[in-house]
Amino acid sequence: MKASSFLPAATQMIYDMGLQHLLQGITFECPPQALAEKQKVVRCVMEGKNYSSAEIDKIFSASKAQGKSLYYVEEELLEHILPDIIFTQDTCEICQIDTKCTAAAVSKLSKQPKIIPLTPNNLQDVYQTAVTIATALGHEEAAYTYLTVLQKRTATILDTLRQHQMPLKRIMLMEWIAPIYNCGHWIPFQIAQAGGIDMLSNPAGDSIVTPFEKIVKYNPEVLIIAPCGFHIERATEEMHLLTQKENWDTIEAVKNNQVYLCDFDLFTQPSASTLVDGIELLAALFHPDLFKVPVYLQKKYFHYSSNRVTHV
């Protein structure tokens, strides 16, 4: 059995479940360990570029309007690997290569692999993708072992919140800065399991452009900024796009120094383990009297305070 993963979330879960010996062929955006060990099959014309949020949005919007993909497959390499299975996705054609583009490349292979799209909408769907992956690789039991550990971690958070009868914090999580996008799909469920509620979000659906005036009116108690594909250092470079907006200083989260920048992979990369990490971080940010940020997550976020970024 040989599998190729055309999305980082699937690669992460394959490693988490100890099935990486079956993996050959990944995407350029996969986790560092995989990049060090596996061949990159999926590439992007924007790879290595440092465009602004607005430029990235413009490029991808133009590509979508023209019916083109910015991703491509190293076809000779894929022919050399000849995988039995390829994991792909249709959740977002901007973030990763999609099934349509994958199928076009695969049609030229001398042996046709099985294409398995992983397209979760909510948090439970993400957990189910682990089962789908492990089952396809012939190791279904690995998924249940993996998920049992993760769901114990989230259950501990929920039990603690119930025990202390904690009220939900009013949250807003941004998936993009210019233009501002709310959060969608599984992220609102992460927020709920951490003891918050994001009334600007779109649970189980796509994130959408959200006017800043709407955010000011909503007045979140905690503001989480986690642009898709950006680590905290990259997101920090664009914070001026928010802080220069009229009425930024009137938002409750800003006035009370409850603005946080977080690495994207805790939220917009739908691997079960990274999303549970995200839930644990959010719980500590929403309810610091009850939860502490785990040591392994302390470099995954910044506390934005008084017009500067400081590590907590």
Image (tube, rainbow, N blue to C red):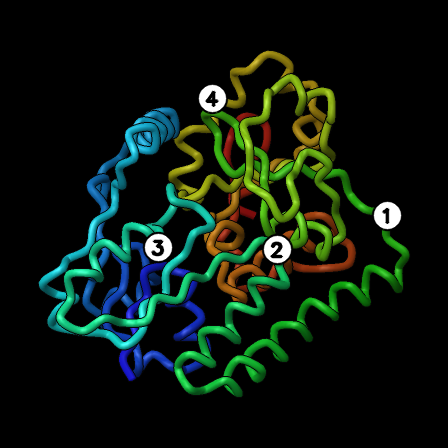
The residue that appears at 23% across and 56% down in the rendered structure is 42
Q: Which mark is residue 181?
A: none
Label 1 Cα crowd, 10 Å radius (few <14 / some 14-19 / many 20+): few
Choose top left, top right, bottom left or bottom right for residue 113: bottom left
> Taking 248 as reference, is 207 above or below it?
below
Whether residue 299 can be seen here:
no
In this figure, which residue is indicated by the disc labeled 2? 122
In this figure, which residue is indicated by the disc labeled 3? 99
Task: Choose between 244 and 57: the one closer to the eye.
Answer: 57
Q: Amino acid at mark 2?
A: Asn
In this figure, which residue is indicated by the disc labeled 1? 167
The residue mark sitting in front, 1 or 3, is 3
Q: Label 2 near label 3: C-beta < 8 Å? A: no
The residue mark sitting in front, 4 or 2, is 2
Q: Amino acid at mark 1?
A: Pro
The residue mark sitting in front, 3 or 2, is 3
> Where is residue 12 drawn, in percent x and y?
41, 67
If the image is split into quadrants, where does the N terminus sit?
bottom left
Task: Choose between 185 and 20: the one closer to the eye.
Answer: 185
The residue that appears at 65% across and 19% down in the rendered structure is 249
In this figure, which residue is indicated by the disc labeled 4? 241
Disc 4 and disc 2: Cα gap in Å? 30 Å
> Where is residue 310 drawn, in percent x and y?
52, 40
Q: Is tag 2's residue or tag 1's residue first in the polypeptide sequence?
A: 2
Q: Amino acid at mark 3?
A: Thr
Disc 3 and disc 2: Cα gap in Å? 20 Å
Disc 1 and disc 3: Cα gap in Å? 42 Å
Give the side of residue 36 with respect to residue 311, left or right.
left
> Taking 154 as reference, is 234 above or below it?
above
